[in-house]
Image: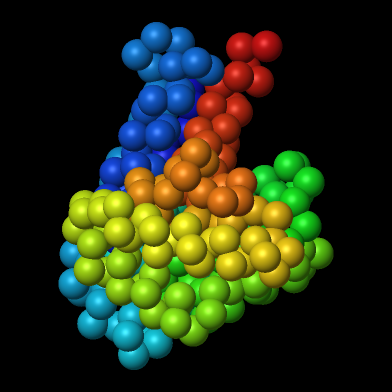
Amino acid sequence: MSLHIGIVVCSAEGGALCYRTICEEAPALMGRHMHPEISTHTIPLGEYMQFIPKDDWKGVAGLMLQSAKKLASIGADFLICPDNTIHHAMPYVLPESPLPWLHIAQEVAEEAHRRGFKKLAITGTKYTMEGTVYPEVLKKAGLEFRVPSPLDREKIDKNIFDELVNGQFRSESLGVFRAAIDRLKSEGCDAVVLGCTEIPLLVTPETSPLPVLDSTRLLARAALRKAIGKALSTNQ
């Protein structure tokens, strides 16, 4: 038996990409049409946005814990959240959580080490680019990082909240991301963190000036490995 994955969703597009990634990549490991049991719970992004602009991470944690408790009540074994921004609330979530979590930034840092990257460009919402989630994890991992300029941060954040979370992916917006990433490349970055879960739906490995670290898919793959690890070891 594989473990039951619980997904705490904040924004629909990122949550859907995470879910699809697990379901699409599981058959190669588990067999045709197979994937772990997965449950999701979504409180509307609008409710989260009552707290996020105020940096009220305790309020965000309260919403995340509502989802966590509901997922625990229906049998989830562990939790993931395919949203980088609300990982700011994790210090308030973890002490009260009924289940363990995988951390999206830690999965990115591990993949960066695996691929030999040293200096990462961070893209995402302004809360991710200007906040502590990635700096804390990357510093502990011995990785350097850079964030876009204030103007680029403003443009990227606007693209995310006005377009990407609403399923809108325009070539003009891709140009904004490409230009920002190219500038970070000129500052010595050797990979870019797609640190908002919708960005990989716009910026792909083929269109990025730097190799990408797709936080959404990396978290999904880590959850898949954790979920089937027990089953694989039992079958060996």
Q: Nearer the viewer, residue 89 or 221?
A: 221
Q: Position of residue 195 (x, y in %)?
A: 49, 60
In the drawing, does residue 100 fall left or right of residue 81?
A: right
Q: Nearer the viewer, residue 24 or 175?
A: 175
Q: Residue at x 48, y 72 (%)?
A: 128
Which quarter of the figure has residue 230?
Answer: top right
Q: Residue at x 50, y 16 (%)?
A: 28
Which quarter of the figure has residue 172?
Answer: bottom left
Q: Nearer the viewer, residue 34 or 131?
A: 131
Q: Determine if residue 62 is in view.
A: no
Q: Residue at x 49, y 84 (%)?
A: 150
Q: Residue at x 47, y 44 (%)?
A: 207
In the drawing, does residue 21 fall left or right of residue 106?
A: left
Q: Position of residue 204 (x, y in %)?
A: 45, 43
In the drawing, does residue 162 fall left or right of residue 199?
A: left
Looking at the image, the residue that sits furthest to the bottom is 54
- Asked if 135 appears above or below 118 in the picture, the reply is below
Q: Nearer the viewer, residue 4 or 111?
A: 111
Label count reads 0
Q: Position of residue 160 (x, y in %)?
A: 32, 65
